[in-house]
Amino acid sequence: MIEEFQLVQVMDQQGELVQGEYEKDISEDLTRTFYRHLIRIRTFDKKAVSLQRQGRIGTYAPFEGQEASQVGSALALQDKDWLFPSYRDHGATMTFGHSLLHILLFWKGRNEGCVPPEGKNIFTPGIPIATQLPHAVGAAFAEKRKGTRNAAIVYFGDGATSEGDFHEGLNLASVWEAPVVFFNQNNHYAISVPMHKQMKTKTIAQKALAYDIPSVRIDGNDIFAVYFETLKALERARNGDGPTLIESVTWRYGAHTTADDPTKYRDQQESESRRKDNDPVDRLMKFMKHRGWGDEEWMTSVQKECAKEVDLAVEELEAYPAADPSVIFDYVFATPTWTIQEQKEKLLERLRGE
Amino acid sequence: MSTLTKMKTLTMVQAITDAMRVMLQESEDVLLMGEDIGTNGGVFRATDGLQQEFGEDRVLDTPLSEAGFIGAAIGMGLNGFRPVAEVQFLGFIYPAYEQIMTHASRIRTRTLGHFTCPLVIRAPYGAGVRAPEIHSDSTEALFTHMPGIKVVCPATPYDAKGLLIAAIEDPDPVLFLEPMRCYRSSREEVPEEKYTVEIGKGKVVTEGEDVTIIAWGAMVKVAEDAAKEAADKGISCEVLDLRTLYPLDRDLISSSVQKTGRTVVVHEAHATGGVGNDVLAIINDNSFLYQKAPTERVTGFDTPVPYFGFEDFYLPDSKRVLAAVEKVARY
């Protein structure tokens, strides 16, 4: 089956274009946009890991290594599309327009972080694995019912494909011809369980055959492949041609979350050699360098701007108003029930020292 | 009620169909989804004729996929629709439990009201109709314990229509339990037009002085029968139909048990962790000093709902309820 689902590359590991037909679609501007977003989310990710280490945010799920998958796919979206992330996809949500402050608030245990910017259809990070797939199908189907050309994209990992919700989501999308893109980031590991213990199949893309959904297996560290294949899938969705499954083959360098130690379950040499040979940011830089696009001075200025933006978000986070205990009671229902109202009053009384 | 109100005589299942028809007519945002609800009109015919009337786009036959279609209904709710999903039997809702527990019930809280989940899940429930295994479960307490979802359970055609319309209009998720034994057991005059019964309000079914019997769903009829039998023995019972299991109608419970001072709670669900215990907690919190006898519970057992060859042993009947009434009356 792996022969039928050959890895699609537009740019190889040396940063050379390997599919000439994309030449016309690639501009210096586009690569600069890619570069800026890759640096931005990587800067954020590194900062967040460091904040966790210092106890300034809670447990954090890093995505370093997966930046091309997240940036390339999120940049393919249009403004009114829907994005359903998992907990490791805030690189995609920030690229699509979520605020850094809100993403940090989420990781600091604040519900406020789940509120997207007005007008942005970004759902909350899916914690229970694969549960967000049916939501995306429903939201996409709703767009179809309304007669729009909007689509939904939903992110999930390799482990998620073992869950029932993955299969139920794909089946429903297939039957309803829902305008949804199932964007799988295959980083080869659930927490500690490698792909060969997760599934017997050699690819994730092939699972779409069972649902008669088109699928493609792409080099997830090749931002061009990610971007162009996601655009194609979204275009299919907008044109009423239904869902697509994209398997974006990538790697996370670090831990599942800051609460685990990857050296316990895999040889971190592998991460180091992938960082050296197949880093998504380096590959784009090589590509740009070959063409003389984006000189070092510009790249340094981008890095500085991103660092500044992230630092500013951290400042905003740390100046953010303290948690108001009313929040846990006031949004359970549109109108609180008597049990919740009384529990709230008792807590507030106690906090006031009465 | 105005004398101009047109009435029709309906069974509970017909009243439920009527409620859905009224809401489908009123708003394009309302859509029905579930297994076999289209051409077949649902396993209990609750959606009979609705797909023919409103089309396949608004009355959706879904794949056999409870987690999938409840999850998709959540997504539709996020995106402007008001889905009414039918689960064929409450005992088949368990694959969707994760979607309800981890998403439907907490989307509003999680997003401080930015996203909401105006979803109604209808589920036939309860024993007493000689159904196969799993078809007779009464696991309402799994949902009353779940923060962020209301649980409603009518016992009559009038209440069924009014409560279902209220549930569909409610901005938050509602589990709407339909006691199968009541589907066709009686008929009642029901207004043809739209009306609502307030969620969170129970009612006095029979007024009485000596003992309060508290029930819901199919157990309301059992309680009424026991009250009649008790009357023959000189015990006057007040029967309450809670109608909503979360949030409970504390005022109704308190006013009745403070009057009688003696209470029997009846439910067909398992005793441990049952909603009856929440009723007891309300009595304890508000009416402790009014009590003249310890409250009795008449419930199903802490066993799986048995195969139907045994269900008469399991299900509370009027004799068991009467024995409890006499016990609290004599205490």
Image (cartoon, coloured by chain):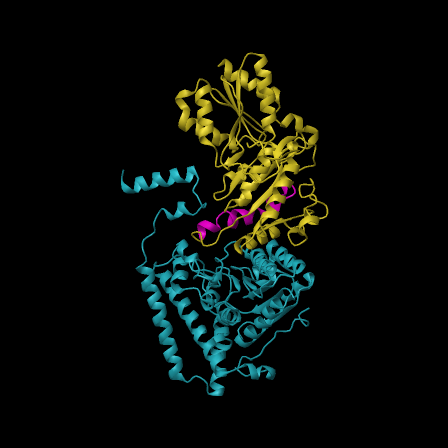
Chain colours: A cyan, B yellow
Tell me: residue A296, above or below residue B258: below
In the image, B261: left or right of B82?
left
Q: Residue at x 35, y 47 (%)?
A: A325
- Whether residue A313 appears in this view of the structure is yes
| x then y, percent, for residue B83 | 58, 49
Tell me: residue A339, above or below residue A318: above
Q: Nearer the viewer, residue B219 or A277?
A: B219
Q: Nearer the viewer, residue A273 or A118?
A: A118
Q: Nearer the viewer, residue A256 or B96?
A: B96
Q: Residue at x 50, y 77 (%)?
A: A277
| x then y, percent, for residue A185 | 55, 66
Residue farthest right in this picture: B39
Q: Quadrant of residue A164?
A: bottom right
Tell me: residue A269, above or below residue B226: below
Q: In which quarter of the image is residue B123?
A: top right
| x then y, percent, for residue A114 | 44, 57
Q: Does the magenta stretch include residue B90?
A: yes
Tell me: residue A198, above or below residue B31: below
Give the dominant element type of the magenta stretch: helix, strand or loop: helix
In the image, A263: left or right of B313?
left
Q: How many labels does the image show?
A: 0
Look at the image and tell me in which quarter the N terminus of chain B lies: top right
Residue farthest front in this picture: B4
In the image, B218: left or right of A275?
right
**Residue segment shown in magenta:** B85-110
- Whether residue A203 appears in this view of the structure is no
| x then y, percent, for residue A193 | 55, 59
Q: Is residue B234 magenta?
A: no
